[in-house]
Image (spheres, grey):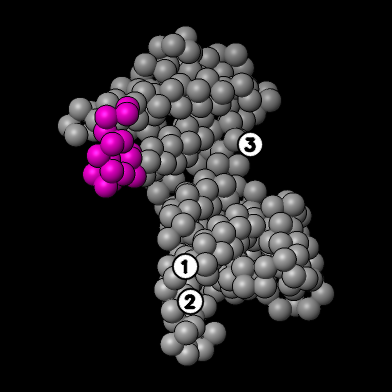
Amino acid sequence: MQRFIIIRVFHSILALLAISMIIFFLARISGDPIEMLLPIEATDEEFAAVRAAWGLDKPLPIQYVTYLGNIARGNFGQSIKWQGEDALSLVLSRFPATLELAFLSLFVSAAIALPIGVIVAVKKDTGIDFAGKIIALMGQSLPSFWLGLMLMWIFSVQFGLLPTSGHGTLRHLILPSVALGYFQVAAVMRLTRSSMLEVLDTEFVKLARIKGLSETKVIWKHCLRNALIAPLTYFGLILGGFLTGSVVTETVFTWPGVGLLAVDAVRARDFQVVQSVVVFFAFLFIVCNLIVDILYAYLDPRIRYTH
């Protein structure tokens, strides 16, 4: 088991290094951030002085090695756009808003997909089954930014029920969470449907019906409880996707999360913040996958010997 964990940790470190290298060099494709800081009339000497102050006058390989050394000491650099603020502190200050949006989006996905999955399983191969599939598949067919704009137009512009942007109350969360969460409805619905079909054909369900339990109790209590294993496992992956995939939704609704921070940083060519956002989320994903791998190895010893 120790060998398995050591190998997994080593692979995780390699993945994190690869991601940091890729984002470090890709971030610099957008251009020189000093051009965003200094006025057009600035002299070459002023450009050179500011570039040297930020360490941008050195070759890229040396800049990357310096960057890795700073990360090892917990220093992710200073923001260029936000007047020298600590880049990681900026990310962490925006993370609660992204986390808030991700959890409510997860709730929206579950609230829509689970009932539909149960109903279409019970009404298999009927018109209800077909209609449920169409409703769910629309979630993956409609771009989240388009759905967000349509929701804003209907509920904000036409009816004036909900705000188009902002942060602070549940009303501000409703539209962005629906726009973000609806995308995953199809996947959760299909998992729920397939799990329910398996459970509905089991002996204990037949026995429950023979005992005279109501169909509602059999389906929504006994069947759904046993069919939730697969969807609940997938919810962990969905949450990770919501955390890192909320860039477009946060931009559309001006939601003050990490996604909007990343967009603003890219526009300002703020390398430090862009790198901090990507490395931070990569670290979260890698740690979560590492924990899952270790738990699976404990639950199924065969996994330890096949890797």
Query: Which residue is drawn at the image coordinates 42% and 73% (left, top)?
Result: 204
Nearer the observer, 119 or 11:
119
Query: Which residue is drawn at the image coordinates 50% and 42% (left, top)?
Result: 82
Q: Position of residue 291 (x, y in %)?
A: 31, 43
Q: Which residue is mark 2?
A: 206
* Amino acid type, label 2: Lys
Q: Position of residue 48 (x, y in %)?
A: 52, 15
**Is label 2 in contact with label 3 (beta carbons under 8 Å)?**
no
* Amino acid type, label 3: Arg
Q: Over which residues does the magenta segment extend?
A: 290-307
Name which quarter of the figure residue 252 lies in.
Answer: bottom right
Nearer the observer, 224 or 259:
224
Q: CA distance from mark 1 to mark 2?
A: 7 Å
Q: Which residue is mark 1?
A: 202
Q: Position of residue 305 (x, y in %)?
A: 27, 29
> Badge 1: how crowded within 10 Å, few (<14), some, or many (20+)?
few
Is 285 situated above or below 52?
below
Give the overall secondary structure of the magenta segment: helix
Q: CA distance from mark 2 to mark 3?
A: 60 Å
- Specify which label sits upstream in the sequence, 2 or 3: 2
Describe the element under mark 3 as helix, strand or loop.
helix
Is 143 situated above or below 303?
below
Q: Which residue is mark 3?
A: 267
**Is label 1 in contact with label 2 (beta carbons under 8 Å)?**
yes
Q: Nearer the viewer, mark 2 or mark 3?
A: 2
Let me know if residue 306 is in the magenta part: yes
Describe the element under mark 1 as helix, strand or loop.
loop
Q: Nearer the viewer, mark 1 or mark 3?
A: 1
Q: CA distance from mark 1 to mark 3?
A: 56 Å
Locate the N terminus by quadrant: top left
